[in-house]
Each structure stands twice: as structure tokens, then as C-alpha cells.
Image: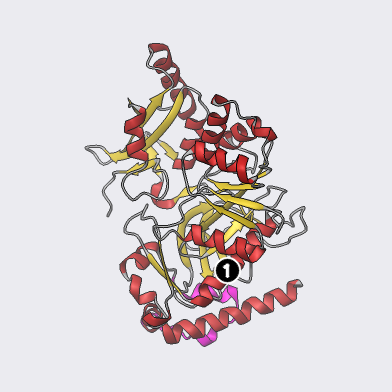
Amino acid sequence: MTGKRTTEYKAQSLQSLLQYVSVHSPYYKTLFETHHIDSSTIHTVADLVAIPPTSKEDVQRYNSAFLCVPQRDVVEYAATSGTLGAPVTIALTERDLQRLAYNEYNSFVTADGSADDIYQLMLTLDRQFMAGIAYYSGLRMLGAGVIRLGPGVPSLQWETIERLKPTTIIAVPSFVLKLIKYASENGIDINASSIKKAICIGENIRNADLSLNILGKKITDAWDIKLYSTYASTEMQTAFTECSAGMGGHHFEELLVIELLDENDKQVPPHTPGELTITTLGVEGMPLLRYKTGDICMYFDEPCTCGRKTWRLSPILGRKQQMIKFKGTTLYPPALFDILNERDEIKEYVVEVYANEVGLDEVLIYIVPADETEDCDRSIRAYLQARLRVSPYIKYIAAADMQKMQFPENARKAVKFLDKRAKN
């Protein structure tokens, strides 16, 4: 659509949403009454500032009050992983599932997918994980082939790749490194395989300037495949996916209104970090208005080289609640993960943050070292001191113990950050 038609469509969709939640959402009905908000006076995205943002804590505390349909109309229940507190249940109607499929169809087309592709899904497909059903539904709409293999087991992944010849994998980047390692140890020529693309989920493969980070470089240095980064959350039921230009995740305007807000809830300019705040369009079961995701990123408003003109999002720089103030240094876990991923001496890790006796943040890093020599220990400690300018506590553990830490019972994805600070 042209810019004018897009603006008109978004305004109409927004007005329909406001009318819908003012009638059907117990939470937003109460919010509007408490703040004396007349939803009929809000006509454009700019007018949304009249509505107080909704926080993650609001959705956790009043989860069922966001439901806008009778229970009999709910056909699917998804849930967040509970990384930042109690899991949130998201109820979806049949229409919501169709919207979810359309979103992922758009995502796969953006990432150069077609009906000629075969996708091997190396991710959790059960345990109320929305991403699994979203990818599957989107690929069905695309008309592509799907191999629902699930996460883990590099040997089975490679046996299936060699047997069924998929063109694309969908996986967590750190697991792609395990595929590369297994192939190297077992004489598999990865560049002779059928895989040409990887849709990377759950972890950053790019720096803030959109260049490949260490994780992305390690993959592409070993494997001649094209990487596409994607970012999404259960609550927004929408994804931001890169095109082949790799210049940020594209925004689908018909599905989502986005704002990036500063500490005073004011929109930040392009190329400036802010908290991603979303308003869902077309969601029937549990729509959200000005929902603050807690994720810090930037947006780019210049047209992409692929021809799309909508905003694009940078990699997630960190989660607001996970910010670490460590000996005068501000850290977000993704940046710390990038530093840890750089060293071959560090095979696996989990970062733990806790408050000391005077309430200040302390950082403990559990590490599986490449070997248990003094030279390896000195190298790791010197490297972390040089990169962080402060020295975290380090505890070396065995690979089996690390496996238990990263994959506790019922975990849907690897746990690499433990926040032991008391929550207010």
C-alpha cells in the first residue's frame, strides 16, 4: 500500500481495536474508566499517548482480565517461558491462529522463503511454546515442506538432513555451532549439504550496528549459509524478521503498532535505544494496548535496500529488568554473552547475577573450560578483565552439571542467565 493508504488503514484498525477492548476487555474497560479515557477521541497512533502503558507485571497479575472472548471461543493456549517472573498465558481464537500463520508467512517470504524450500524445525514444538506452532502454520501457508524434528540431538539432525535434504533450518544459533562441531568430529562436509539458509531464533547474531557478532561470525566462517535473524514474543503474536540485506527486522504495520519509549514514556528518535512498546492489531482473544515488552532496541526509518519502507528493529540490546550495574559498569546479558562466545577456552557458560550484602549487583559466571589447566584459567580471567574492565567471579563446572543448569526440568530453551536478585 502507499504511505497514505497505510496510514489510513492503521488508523481504522486502531479505532476498531479501541472500540473492541472498551467493550470486551475487563482490564482495559477498568483502565479507561479509572483514567477517564474516551476511546472514541483516539483516532491516530499519535493519540495513543493518552493511554497509560501496560506493563509485563500488569499482564502477569491480571492475566485473565485481558481475555476478550468467551472460553468456548479459545482454541489454543500458549504461554511465555517465565524468564522474567510468572509465565503469562495467551489465549488464541481461530482467527488469532490465522493471524499468527499470516505473520509467519510474511516472515518467511521476507527471509527469501518459497514453496520450493524444505524447513527443518530444530526447536520446541510443545509445552505451550507459541513459536513452534507459529512457524509450522506459516510454513503450511507458504506451501513449503516441513520436518518437525524438535531441538537437540545433532546426530539425528544430520542424519535427517542427509536423508531428506532440507534447504533451511530454524534453530537457536548456539545450537547451530553444535551442529558444526558434530559435523567436524564425524567427517561431515557441511558445505556439501543441502542447507543454504538458517532462520536464527532466540539469540542475537548481530551487533547493534547490524554487523555479525561473534556468534554469527563463528557460524558463517565455518558454514557457507545465509543467516536471517528474527525476533518475536508470545504476547505480541508477531515477528520482526530480516530480509537478505540483514539490516534489521522488518515491521509488519498491518499487525502491530510500535513505539520505542524512553524512561519518561516519550518516543525516541531513530538509532536511539528505547523500550519496545507494542499495540496489537487484529488480535481477537487477548489484544494489548501500549504493552511495554521490557526489550531495549533501536529502530531505523530509512528505506531498506530490499525496497521495503517500514521501520526495522535492531537486535535486542537487553531486557530492561535484566540490566546489571556491576562495579560502575552497566551490562546487559546479550553483550556479556557476546564476550563469552568469543573465546575457544570457554565451551559453555551460565551467567548468574545476585545482590551482595549491601544490595549491589555481583556477577558469577559458571564455565565449562576447554581444559582444566592453570594456563586456561589465566587466559579466561585475563580476557574477562580486559573486556569488562572489572573481574566477575568464576566457577568452573563439569559439562554434565552445565547441562542440568542450562536445561532444568520443563525448560523450552537453554537457560544462560540466572537473576537471583530480590524483586521489589
Residue at image location 61% in from the left, 60% down from the top: 139
Please tell me whether residue 48 is drawn above or below residue 248 in the rendered image.
below
Q: Is residue 421 left or right of residue 277?
A: left
- Residue nearer the viewer, 132 or 231: 132
Badge 1: few (under 14), some or many (20 or more) residues near its Cα, within 10 Å?
A: many
Q: Secondary structure at mark 1?
A: strand
Residue 109 in picture, x, y percent from top left: 69, 59
Query: Quarter-wise, where is residue 88 in the image?
Result: bottom left
Q: Is residue 392 left or right of residue 4?
A: left
Q: Is residue 92 visible?
A: yes
Residue identified by numbered label 1: 256
Residue at image location 65% in from the left, 52% down from the top: 118
Q: Is residue 392 visible?
A: no
- Residue nearer the viewer, 144 or 327: 144
Span colored in magenta? 34-52
Quadrant for the N terminus in the image = bottom right
Residue at image location 42% in from the left, 47% down from the top: 413
Residue 134 in picture, x, y percent from top left: 53, 62
Residue 181 in picture, x, y percent from top left: 54, 29
Please tell me whether residue 89 is drawn above or below residue 157 in the rendered image.
below
Indicate whether residue 40 is drawn in magenta.
Answer: yes
- Amino acid under disc 1: Leu
Indicate whether residue 134 is drawn in magenta.
Answer: no
Determine the residue located farthest toward the left in the rendered image. 357
